[in-house]
Amino acid sequence: MSSIEDNELPKANISRVLKNALPPGTALQKEAKLAVSKAATVFINYLSTVANDTAKSANHKTISAPDVFKAMEVLEFDDLIPALRESFTGNITIYCLHKQKSGQEVDEEDDEEEEEEEDEEMIDSQDSPNDKSRENTAEE
């Protein structure tokens, strides 16, 4: 199983989110950014695990947006769901408009297949030779 360090979020993204979330002029120590980064990683892992359980209980192989929203309910983050849905709906609208402008058809089944292929590629890339050499070292 991987540790938090194996799934570190990009520092630039964390800094940007913090800058946009906090009032102008708010100073942050380096340790505070690191703590937020670690907390965000733990939250993402926890939320995705619950969303995966939700998808599996519905006999789905792929986690969908409704599974994530349901996971938010299960984790008792009900107060955050309306803002999340609004943001999600806005992003989906922009995504669909962008695909239509570029002449691509918007097809949810194609998107799911592409996402599954990307997930499989990501999983395959995680099984790199470096991982196997670490396993061999651990066995010695």
Image (tube, rainbow, N blue to C red):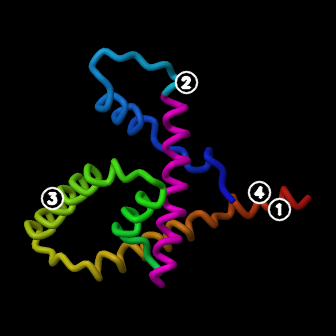
Dot 2 alpha-carbon crowd within 10 angstroms: few under 14, some 14 to 19, many 20 or more: few
Q: Is residue 46 left or right of residue 67?
A: right
Q: Is residue 16 within the magenta segment? A: no
Residue at horizontal 11 percent and vertical 68 percent from the top: 102
Closer to the eye: label 3 or 4: 3
Q: Which residues are magenta?
A: 33-60
Instruction: Give whichever of discs 2 and 1 has the lower sequence position.
Output: 2
Residue extending furthest left?
Answer: 101
Closer to the eye: label 1 or 3: 3
* SS type, badge 4: helix
Residue under circle 1?
Answer: 136
Instruction: Check if mark 2's residue and mark 1's residue have beta carbons within 8 Å.
Output: no
Residue under circle 2?
Answer: 31
Instruction: Indicate the quadrant containing the N terminus: top left, top right, bottom left or bottom right.
Output: bottom right
Closer to the eye: label 2 or 1: 2
Residue at horizontal 18 percent and vertical 76 percent from the top: 106
Residue at horizontal 17 percent and vertical 56 percent from the top: 90
Residue in the foreground of this view, choosing between 56 and 12: 56
Q: Specify the amino acid type for callout 3.
A: Ile
Residue under circle 3?
Answer: 94
Instruction: Check if mark 4's residue and mark 1's residue have beta carbons within 8 Å.
Output: yes
* SS type, badge 2: helix
Residue under circle 4?
Answer: 134
Q: Quadrant of residue 23?
A: top left
Across and down, in percent, residue 99 comes to 15, 68
